[in-house]
Structure formats: C-alpha cells, structure tokens
Image (cartoon, rainbow, N blue to C red):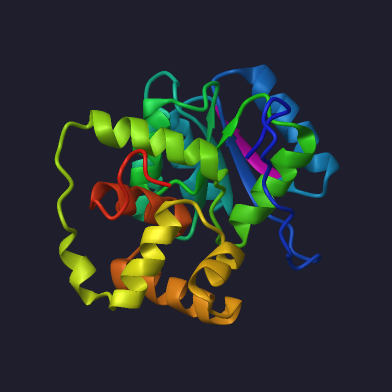
Amino acid sequence: MTPATHPEGPPVPVTDPARVPRVLIADDQTLIRTGFRLILNARGIEVVGEAADGAEAVAAVRELRPDVVLMDIRMPNMDGLEATRRILERHPDCRVLILTTFDLDRYVYEALTLGASGFLLKDVTPEHLAAAVRLVDTGDALLAPSITRRLVERYAAEAGRAPAVHADLVVLTPREREVLTWLGRGLSNTELAAELCLSEATVKSHVARIFAKLGLRDRAQAVVLAYETGLVRAGER
C-alpha cells in the first residue's frame, strides 16, 4: 500500500497467473480514473468500469460484479463510505480498496470498520497499485503495519469510547486471543510463527479459525477489532 514516499509496499502476491482481476474505479476526478485504468490495463488487470460518485459505484457493482473496487472517499452525491457500506452489504465477496490523499485520514478508519480491505494513497507507484489489486483479489488485506497502526491508534482513541470486550471474543481459545492480539499489532504470519514458536501452517490455521468465529473478512478488520476491544492499546508495541 505504498506510494513512492513510503518505504513499505504491498508484497507481490502469489496468485494464479491465469486469473485476471476485474476492477471498478470510483473517483470523481477523471484524470485519476484514466491514469489508473491505463496503469492496470498495461499490467494485465481488466478495468470493467468507472464511476464518478458513490451512487454510480453502487449501481456499477450491481451490474458489472467486479472483484475489486478502487474507491475514493470524498465524492459528490454519495461519498465512498456509504458506497462501501452498501456494496459490502449486498456483495460480500467484492473487495474494496480505499483511495485517499492522506495516510492518516479518519474516513479511512471508518472504511476499515465497514469492511474495506485496505487503503492506497493516490500517489501510489504503478507497480504497487497493480500488486495491491492482485493482493486483495486473493482475499488478503492490504496493510502497511506502521501506517495502519498509527491510523487505528489515532481514531480509535478519538472515538471517545472505552474498549468493550466484544461478545464474540468468548468463543476464542486463549491461544486464538493471543494470535488476535499479535495480529492487531501488525505482525505477519511469519512474524507470528517466530513470536509464538509455532509453524507458519499452524498460525494460518489459528488465523482462519479466528476469522470464521468472529465473522471477519480479513486482517484489516482484525486490526480494528483488536484495538476496539482493548486487546491492543494505543502506544503498545
């Protein structure tokens, strides 16, 4: 999820080379839409449509059924937050990547809580844009840990509510709660395996069970949940 100004970028995912993600670009700036379309098409990713506002995005997803939506937040008529909410309610298999100008944007935090799979700064490099689309198309989340942690810490704290234990957390085993805590701190599966002295396969099994039990789409929602339930607190590392 990294523009040229950040050292962290999305890993290049291991995907089926024959699979071509189908993408919808929703942004009120024609230049942004055109530029992203050219970048993605040149890298073998199909852009099936464009939308100039949230209402158009919702209608286009219903008609075109894209795999991934690149969603601007600040658009006329219907903003990207409401569009994201409606799209994911009606099309839960669709993945939404938020486009923003600022890496610490309160609206990005809200979008993650709604189920967006990550966010991109609009000055993202062409290589990272294509890698990000392919990554979320596999069902993963796009998280640069240091940026996401700062984002969640800032806006979870500003929400002004004390962390409450999520009712569903009682279904987790002690080990699963521990894994969720480390997920909230931004650790990858490889880092989790090293921290907990487990095999990476075992970690993946724990993560999959956590997602299933809590109804989480991906790591983005796991990070938000870990902060909102108090498993991870601002300033902890």
Is residue 83 at least partly visible in the picture? no
Q: Residue at x 78, y 35 (%)?
A: 126
User: Could you tell me residue 136's position as x and y percent?
Assistant: 59, 54
Q: Residue at x 22, y 76 (%)?
A: 171
Q: Is residue 27 above or below residue 215?
A: above
User: Could you tell me residue 146's position as x and y percent?
Assistant: 53, 39
Q: Where is residue 135, by image quadrant?
A: bottom right
Which residues are the magenta region?
Answer: 47-51
User: Could you tell me residue 19's position as x and y percent?
Assistant: 74, 64
23 vs 74, left or right, is: right
Q: Is residue 129 above or below residue 169?
A: above
210 vs 167, left or right, is: right
User: Could you tell me residue 54's position as x and y percent?
Assistant: 43, 31
Q: Which of the image's four quarters has the N terminus? A: top right
Q: Residue at x 74, y 54 (%)?
A: 12
Q: Nearer the viewer, residue 83 or 103?
A: 103
Whether the magenta-drawn stretch holds residue 36 is answered as: no
Whether the magenta-drawn stretch holds residue 48 is answered as: yes
57 vs 49, left or right, is: left
Q: Nearer the viewer, residue 152 or 73?
A: 152
Majority secondary structure in the magenta region: strand
Q: Is residue 38 above or below residue 191?
A: above
Q: Where is residue 30, by image quadrant?
A: top right
Is residue 137 at least partly visible in the picture? yes
Q: Residue at x 60, y 41 (%)?
A: 24
